[in-house]
Image (tube, rainbow, N blue to C red):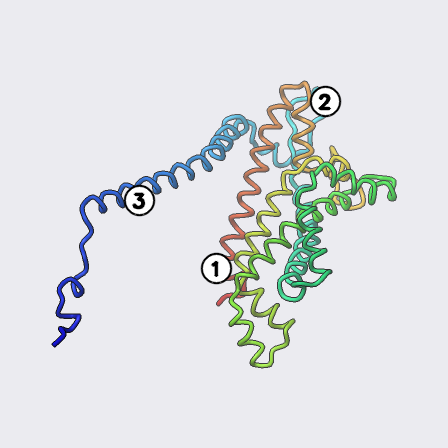
């Protein structure tokens, strides 16, 4: 008469790991955790060093005049970058309004409608190429396509250049985020009779909205500090200007002009401008992330 398998103690009781195996696993766990902490430190250390140095060099030059006055004439002390701060806000706002919707629309097409199609492959290849184009090349291209036909520099030309630079990042991020949406969700919507275009907008896009918003923030942060495209397009302005068809001031341009000048006063203001630019980018990205987490930008639950 054969015995039941459960009657065998060797089969019913799990084997306890030896102390050597436990020590080895703990050592491997601590080692990998240490590597993760070290990698995090190596990533954050340069950022912390840059922020500390900017605060050290630029905080002493921040005052009310810096935020309320235009640049002072050559040889005079004081002045500020109020027109450049407002100009950067205008350029980035209009560029985002032009570039982000186009990038999201292209990403939705690639993920939901263009898989395996020639047009989809062409759009994907173009986005990858544009993502690697140097910013100065983009500035020269927009100079030839927009500035030369208009015969003058303009804020609009700078906005077009920055918008085109934003589109590839937003497009590829949107496509990748939509690819993470489970197909079961789409199939459920289609099974209820929802059209495919409505499913893509109301279901897939909303589900992937946190990742898409992150991609938009990355694209915004990338172009916010670009100087080369604006040198060939917006050109800069020492005075107040709100006309999109005329040259306009921008923080990166003003920082560049002050940094290459031989005047210590302008060098001091350049450090202050760099600090303000970084602070504005960080505040903008943080506010978008807060609103997204609260559901204000992704339609709630």
Q: Is residue 8 above or below residue 20?
A: below
SS at badge 3:
helix
- The mark closer to the camera, 3 or 1, is 3
Q: Is residue 188 left or right of residue 131?
A: left
In primary-sequence order, the first of circles 2 and 3 is 3
Residue positioned 60% across, 58% down in the render? 175
Q: Is residue 26 left or right of residue 138?
A: left
Image coords of residue 150 (percent x, y): 86, 43
Q: Mark 1 sits on what residue?
A: 294
Quarter of the rendering occupied by the N terminus: bottom left
SS at badge 1:
loop
Cα separation between marks 3 and 1: 35 Å
- Residues at discs 3 and 1 in contact (Cβ within 8 Å): no
Q: Residue 139 sits in which quadrant?
A: top right
Q: Is residue 161 left or right of residue 182?
A: right
Residue closest to the eye, 99 or 197: 197
Q: Residue 11 sits in which quadrant?
A: bottom left
């Amino acid at each position: 008469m054969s015995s039941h398998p459960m009657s065998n103690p060797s089969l019913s009781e799990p084997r306890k790991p030896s102390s050597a195996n436990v020590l080895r696993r703990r050592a491997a766990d601590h080692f990998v955790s240490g590597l993760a902490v070290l990698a995090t430190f190596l990533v954050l250390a340069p950022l912390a060093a840059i922020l500390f140095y900017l605060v050290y060099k630029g905080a002493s030059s921040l005052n009310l005049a810096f935020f309320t006055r235009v640049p002072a004439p050559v040889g005079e002390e004081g002045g500020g970058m109020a027109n450049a701060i407002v100009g950067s806000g205008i350029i980035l706002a209009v560029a985002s309004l032009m570039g982000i919707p186009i990038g999201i629309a292209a990403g939705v097409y690639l993920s939901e409608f263009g898989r395996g199609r020639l047009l989809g492959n062409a759009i994907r290849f173009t986005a990858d190429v544009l993502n690697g184009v140097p910013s100065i090349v983009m500035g020269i291209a927009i100079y030839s396509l927009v500035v030369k036909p208009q015969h003058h520099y303009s804020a609009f030309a700078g906005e077009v250049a920055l918008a085109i630079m934003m589109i590839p990042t937003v497009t590829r991020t949107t496509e990748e985020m939509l690819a993470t949406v489970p197909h079961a969700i789409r199939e459920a919507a289609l099974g209820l009779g929802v059209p495919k275009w409505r499913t893509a907008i109301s279901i897939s896009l909303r589900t992937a909205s946190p990742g898409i918003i992150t991609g938009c923030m990355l694209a915004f942060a990338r172009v916010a500090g670009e100087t080369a495209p604006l040198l060939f397009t917006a050109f800069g302005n020492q005075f107040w200007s709100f006309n999109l068809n005329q040259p306009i001031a921008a923080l990166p341009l003003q920082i560049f002009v002050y940094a290459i000048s031989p005047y210590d006063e302008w060098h001091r203001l350049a450090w202050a401008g760099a600090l303000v630019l970084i602070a504005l980018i960080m505040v903008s990205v943080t506010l978008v992330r807060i609103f997204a987490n609260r559901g204000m930008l992704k339609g709630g639950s």
